Amino acid sequence: MATYDFLFDGLGLREWCDAGRTGDGPLSMADLLAKGGAGRETPWWDLPFPSLDALNEACGRIAQSRDATKGVEEGFLAIKDALRFVLDPLTQPLSWILEFALLVFEAAPWWVMFPLLMAVVYLATKSVRLIVFVTACLAFLAFIDHYGFAMQTLAIIFVCAFLCVLFGVPIGIAMSRSDRMQRMTIPVLDMLQTLPPFVYLIPLIFLFSVTEPKLYGIAIILYAIVPVIRLTDLGIRLVDRDVIEAADSFGVTDRQKLFGVQIPLALPNIMAGVNQTIMMSLAMVVIASLVSAPGLGVLVLRGIRNLELGVGLVSGLGIVLLAIILDRVTKAALDRVNAAQKI
Amino acid sequence: MTDKIKIAIRSLYKIFGDDPEGALEHVRAGVGKTELLERHGHVLGLQDIDVDMREGDITVIMGLSGSGKSTLIRHLNRLIEPTAGQVEVDGEDVLAYGEERLRSLRREAMSMVFQKFALLPHRTVAENAGTTLQVRGVRQRDYLAEARKWLERVGLTGYENHYPHQLSGGMQQRVGIARALTSNSPIMLMDEAFSALDPLIRTDMQDLLLELQKELHKTIVFITHDLDEALKLADRLVILKDGYIVQQDEPQHILLNPNDPYIEDFVSDINRARVLRVRSIMTPLGGGAPPAEAQGEVDFNDTLESMITRSGGDTSHSYVVVQEGAPVGVLEMTNLVKALVPRAASEAGARKY
Ligand SMILES: Nc1ncnc2c1ncn2[C@@H]1O[C@H](COP(=O)(O)OP(=O)(O)OP(=O)(O)O)[C@@H](O)[C@H]1O
Ligand SMILES: [Mg+2]
């Protein structure tokens, strides 16, 4: 005697239900519980929510929740091969790029890497103080023998942030030019931004094998691309209308307007987006160590898994240092752009 | 100055809203700006505008805020598309132009100066001034040379490599003017180009514009809401109100014969002696001989102010007016005194006493 019998009886569906009841399915927890308390009337205040399991008790034709979960899984597995057939070759270059970058960053001796990074910092910021700071941080990491891990993390961030900009800026530009495109893209961006990072990993693990770098590459890019898209769109939409009008009045082509006016004037916003994108890549690369992303995240993971407090804390400090370096350098570059276009 | 019509605007209408065509019917049937907005939810930008602008003239468009000045000037280079009507430049219908021809019109035939300067903040002064040539595909060395030339002409030598934010407002607008001049276009559109500047700088800029114009003879369309500025610059004055033209004529003529209370209000507060010229109030000779009892000769273009000084305030005097050496009319000082009183003021005075 199940609670919702009255419903199916009332609707005259009893026969349809009974015809479907096979009774040889595996017992669910609810079945077991029901068996235990069989024959007892349920008082009305104990009326369970009409969930799948509760309805199944009354009518065998209704699927149980675990069947639904299973259905989702089977559905996903069914399209998995097709998806994989399309996505695998498309994303294969990502694996190559990541492997290559990791190889280069690991193979390059430290006395090449240090001057190279210093040069990059100088080009981006023109600030000697920052160079000293960055060098000191890297030297400290090297001193405590975390240099290799830090370089792996940096390599992944460089590749992913670069790809985010490469795809994100054009998407942002397309959004700024068409309201329809903007309306269609924003829900996707909202979803990417609100999904907890772990949730990205679930479908990806099934799609690609865990040993492939592109698995974490895709997760990082999906997670970190949002700010650069949003801020490119915003930046271009915020460009002074008077300046756009002036450009129009001189007879610029769309191309000239985009590259000569809109992008340069939106650059401070785009750069702010790049800064956020890099910071989010860093956050994700740590989480992605769960799916075999190398770098400092692996050490953090080891610290958690084996309760090696020291390892976890020191590598955590390493991540903080990297975060500060990346943030300072991109912010300084942003300030330089801002200073050049005060109005 | 030639008599050639450079820009002709013919029965131009502009209505802002969802269904301008439908609203146009109402406007043609005589519905006014306020009523159109309240009853039909459309903004009447311009109605039935007819203006001829002569080559080499400064045509000033004047009106209060919201009267449609900016809307009108933006029709000339089609930054705004009209609801109905024609715009002709050099006799060609601009509205029929396709994208390519419109672009070359904007690049070669017209250049524009903006109230808020609208310079590119990330480019130097010289690069800004050269933009108009750069978009045409001129090489950097050439457009920078041309830009330097015009920057020097507007008095900005030495600032070529500064950025706009390093300059004062007046200097920024000089860059704006240099940018328009660099394009070497025969037509210049100036939308309240001097309104954002303080009064002294503003006078400087007006003088600069007149000086340049003496040399370059461009066709200039100048927008302002300031009557003094309008009278100083205008060869022809067009007065707008609520999107229609109240009066258009030579400024002296409008001053002496305002045809609308709106304009009388406008003109009642200015120093007429300084603005009006002898030619506007003289009695033409019409082929007759100049009177013998005249106190002397005065130039056609002298202001009334200078005449008052000269006559010592004696209203019985009269003078022979000469233009380029030949006598063309007679100036009675009594007429001069009458002209100093605006019509509205004299009527109001008569009613009072
Ligand atoms: N894009 C638009 N949409 C709706 N109404 C508009 C638009 N542009 C202008 N208008 C309206 O058209 C009228 C004329 O505007 P316009 O900008 O031409 O005035 P203006 O004479 O230049 O005023 P100002 O001296 O303040 O610059 C105003 O009533 C304004 O509200
Ligand atoms: Mg305006």
Image (cartoon, coloured by chain):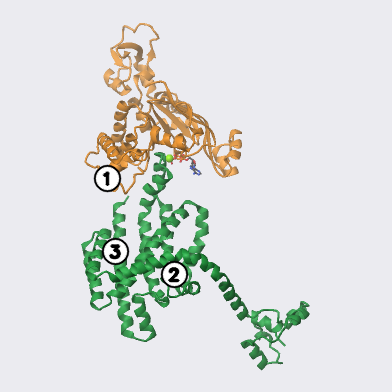
The green-tinted chain is A
Residue A11, given in percent of the width and then of the height, sits at 76, 76
Q: Residue at x 37, y 16 (%)?
A: B282
Check residue B167 in the rendering and tell me which mark sits there, or answer none.
Answer: 1
Q: Position of residue B289 (x, y in %)?
A: 35, 6
Q: Which residue is mark 3?
A: A329
Residue B154, numbered circle: none
Q: Position of residue A154 (x, y in %)?
A: 32, 69
Asked if marks 2 and 3 touch (Cβ < 8 Å), the reply is: no
Seen in the picture, residue A283 relative to B134 is either above or below; the reply is below
Position of A10 relative to B252 (above/below): below
Residue B197 located left or right of residue B262: left
Image location of residue A86, percent across then percent down: 51, 64
The CA span between labels 1 and 3 is: 30 Å
- Pair 1/3: label in front: 3
Say whether residue B295 is left or right of residue A4.
left
Q: Residues within 10 Å of mark 2 (few under 14, many from 20)?
A: many
Question: Label 3 is found on which chain of the structure?
Answer: A
Residue type at mark 1 is Leu
Q: Which residue is mark 2?
A: A219
Which secondary structure lies at badge 1? loop
Q: Chain of mark 1?
A: B
